[in-house]
Amino acid sequence: MYAAFFKRFLDIIVSLAMLILLSPVLIILAVIVRIKLGSPVIFRQERPGRYGRIFGMYKFRSMTDERDANGELLPDEKRLTPFGRKLRSTSLDELPELFNVLKGDMSIVGPRPLLVRYLPLYNSRQSKRHMVRPGITGYAQAYGRNAISWEEKFEKDVWYTEHVSILTDLKILARTVKTVIVREGIDAAGGGIMPMFAGSSDEAFEKMGGVPRILFLGNDSTGLWFFRRQLMAAFMEKGYSVHAAFPDEKCGREIEESGVAVHHIPMNRRSVNPFGDLKYLSMLKKLYREIRPDLVLTYTIKPNVYGGYACRKMGIPYLSTVTGLGSAFKNKGLLRSLVTVMYREGLKGAQVVYFQNSENMRVFSECGITRDRSTALLPGSGVDPEAFAALPYPGHADDILRFLFVGRIMREKGVGEFIAAAGTLHDKYRDRVSFTVMGYTEGDMEEELRKAGDEGVIKIIGFQKDVARYFKEADAIVLPSYHEGMNNVLMEASASARACLASDIPGCREIVEDGVTGFLFEPKSADALTKAMEKFIALDAEERRSMGLAARDRMVSRFDRRIIIDRVLQDAAGIIYGKQESVG
C-alpha cells in the first residue's frame, strides 16, 4: 500500500515543501555556481528512471568544460574543481532534483539514477533496481556511497526494491543525514572518483546469485512437455537452473524426471472468475519470491497476463509468447476491450514478445498492446524433425481411408464441424472411411461427442502422450479450428509425412500449402470441410503419399524447432548476462 500510493503522495508534499523552504539556498547556490563555474548553472543529463524510461535529471553544475588540444573534454577528475567537490560532498548539487521528484521522475528515496549507457551492462538481478522510481538518496548512498563496489551498490539497490516501506525510507533518510555530515564514502575505494561501470564479471555474478534461474510458466503441463521440453533441456545444457509452473498433473512426472524443478499453481484457464484469477496472481508472486527467477518465460493467455504483470511489478525480466488470440479477440465488445487492457498491462514490461503468426502480431500492434514493445515473429513452437520422423504411408489391408483429429475437444477447435462432416461422409461412403477424435474434452462437447460415437460416426480416443503411433495409421490429419497461434499438431503431422486438412486461418495457412501439402477450407463450415475431405478421398494412394512428403520437406526447411531454441537462448543470455551468446 505504501509503495503503490502513499510514497508518491509523500514525495509530492515533501519535495514541494523543501523547494519552498530551501528556495533562498537554491538561489544563493545558483549565483555562486554561475560565478565559479560559469553557465549553464543547472546541468541536465538523461538518466533511466522507473522501468528504464529516460528522463532529464537536474543537478547543479560541479565541473568545468575544460577540453584538450583536440577539443575533447578532459577526464572528470581534472574538471572537478575544489568548489565542485564541496558541492558533491555535501550533496548540495542534488537539490535541483527536487523538481524531478515533484514531476514524478524521481522519489526522495530510491536507487540513484545512473548513466543510460549502463543499461545494457546490467545482469538480470541488477536490472531490478529500475522497478521503482530512482531517488535523491538511497540504501547504497546511505550505507556505503562511493566506498563500495558497483556490485555491492546494485545488491543494496535491489534489496531496497524488495523491501520498500515507510520505516525503511525513514531509516535511509536518517542515515543519509549522518553520512553527509561526517562525509562518509565521498571517494571511491583507493581515493578519487568512482570508476565507470563496465559490467559485472562472471565471478561477481556468481557471488550475487549463483546459477541463473529460468522459470517456464504455462497453463498446462502438456504444452510445456510436448512443445518446450527441448528448450528447457537446452537451458539446462547451458548451465541454467530450470523451473516450470503449471496447474495440472498430466505430464508433471515427465517434466520433473527430465531435471526440471516442478511447481504446481492451481489455475482454471477458461474461467473468468476474477477472484480465482486474483488468487492465481497472488500464488505467482509467492512463487517468484521463493525461487527468485532471473528470467521468466510465459506462454498462453493467463500466464502472459498475470505472470507478466507479476514480473513487471517485482522487477523480474520476462519473455512472453502469444500462442493465439483466443475467442475474446474475434468479436468487438466489452470482453475484447477488457482483455486488451489486461494484455497491455501484462506485456508492458516484457523484454521481448514473441508471436507465432503475423496476423496475431498485427492485431496486438493495432490494439496498442505491443506498439512500444520489442516483438519477434517465430515459426510457432517449431517441430523436432527427429522426434517426428517421416512415416511410411499406410497401406491399409482393409482399404479404409482414415481421418484423424488431434487436439482439445472443444467447439472452437471445430469439433462440431468435424462430427457433422463425418456424418455426411459416413452416410455416403459407409465403411470405406473412418473418423477418429483424439484428445481431452473441454466445454460443452461431451453429449454431442458421445452421441456421434454411439451412432458409429466417429471413434473416440482419450488424450494420448504418444501421438506419432496414431499418425502412423492415419491417412490425413484434420483441424477445422476457428483460430490458432501456430498449430503444433499440424506441424508434427506434417513432419511425420502426413497430409493435413485445415481451416484457412492464420496459424494453419502458414503450415499447410493448399493443394501441395494438404487442403485448406473455410472455417466454421461443415460443408467446406466435407468438400475438402472429398478432394482428399478422390486422390490415389501415390498422390496422398506425395502430399505427405511435401509436408515433411516444408517442416524441415521452415519450422525446425532449433530456430526457436537458438533465438530464445540468445535473448535470454542478452538479458541475464548483458551480452549476446553465439548461436550454433
Image: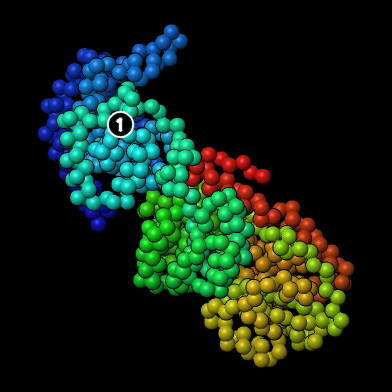
User: What quarter of the picture does the C terminus occupy?
Assistant: top right
User: What quarter of the picture does the N terminus occupy?
Assistant: bottom left
* Residue drawn at the location 52% of the way across and 57% of the way down: 242
Tell me, yes or no, if residue 65 can be seen here. no
**Relative image position of residue 376 (x, y in whole percent):** 57, 49
**Relative image position of residue 389 (x, y in whole percent):** 76, 63
Q: Does residue 182 appear to the left or right of 311 in the view shown?
A: left
Q: Which of 447 and 137 is in front in this view?
A: 137
Give the number of callouts. 1
* Residue drawn at the location 62% of the way across and 49% of the way down: 566
Q: Does residue 545 appear to the left or right of 111 in the view shown?
A: right
Q: Does residue 545 appear to the left or right of 355 in the view shown?
A: right
Q: Nearer the viewer, residue 168 or 392?
A: 168
Q: Nearer the viewer, residue 362 or 485?
A: 485
Q: Name the residue under label 1.
A: 147
| Residue 542 location, quadrant | bottom right
Q: Which amino acid does label 1 sit on?
A: Ala
* Residue drawn at the location 21% of the way across and 22% of the way down: 86
Label 1 crowding class (10 Å Cα cut-off): few <14, some 14-19, many 20+?
A: many
Q: Does residue 542 appear to the left or right of 84 in the view shown?
A: right
142 vs 257: above or below? above
Secondary structure at badge 1 equals helix
| Residue 455 location, quadrant | bottom right
